Image (cartoon, grey):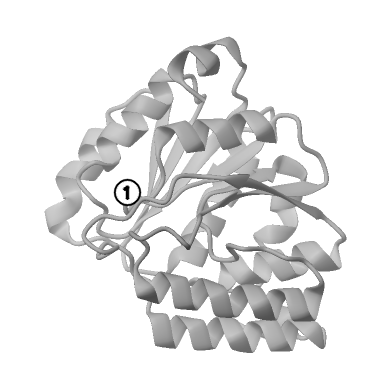
Amino acid sequence: MNKNEAASQKLNSAVVIPALNPVPELAGLVRELLNRGIPKVIVVNDGSGSTYGSIFKEIEKLENCIVLVHKINRGKGRALKTAFSYFLKHFPDLSGVVTADADGQHSADDICNICGILSNVQNSIVLGVRNFREKNVPKRSYIGNTVTSHIFRLLYGSRLHDTQTGLRGIPSPELSWMVEIAGERYDFEINMLIRARHRKLGFKTVPIKTLYFNNNSGSHYNTIKDSFRILKILISGKVGRYRLINF
């Protein structure tokens, strides 16, 4: 979706960005999203270092942008749930939220496209899916997603090529149960998919650009540690105990 298309289409979703030590370009991305017609942007400063304060101050000055703060790092899952709770309380008239990462992986084009699609989606979660066959994909990202995608298909019957995407469109009615499920870090995002399957929600997948900067050095995903957590949740979720797991 280009700027002209975005201007002609009513975008009725907020963008949520959990941020731990974000890339400097984050402020520019937020500004561009607002200029394209995104009604609200909610950024969660999840315990970032003091050297990143200027980025959040710049964002906070933007009209229709809210910056929520965790004084210490509480994890991506908790940051998302903090934003979802705020959204439910303050923006009941919006159709949903689109989550995006703060490490430069998601373009304004793709975020706005997901926002536009979300306005016409019910009983489904919209997932922005990367192409992991591209040459610029870091090996750790390829391995992590390939393993979890195969296991998710085996256990839950849905073929998702990108189970770990951070670019997701979520309708407002689904947020109330999402803030209650377990998961404080990356485990929350896989718990979201498991619970969605149990609730018989659909998944609408949308191809997005595969963007990585400095071999994805801005990501806080630990390939071994976080992949093990996700694997454990996938198996436990199959036997109905996923709601009890919280790392």
**Viewer-nearest residue: 153 or 76:** 153
Residue occupying the point 45% across, 31% down: 109
Q: Residue furthest left?
A: 51
* Whole-percent x, y for residue 139 in the image: 37, 74
Horizontal arrangement in the rendering, residue 156 relative to residue 4 (left or right): right
Q: Which residue is mark 1?
A: 104
Horizontal arrangement in the rendering, residue 34 relative to residue 243 (left or right): left
**Viewer-nearest residue: 61 or 31:** 31
Horizontal arrangement in the rendering, residue 123 relative to residue 105 (left or right): right
Horizontal arrangement in the rendering, residue 195 relative to residue 230 (left or right): right
Q: Secondary structure at mark 1?
A: loop
* Whole-percent x, y for residue 173 in the image: 77, 44
* Whole-percent x, y for residue 19 in the image: 35, 54
State whether residue 121 is above or below residue 228.
Answer: above
Residue occupying the point 74% across, 74% down: 153
**Viewer-nearest residue: 166 or 75:** 166
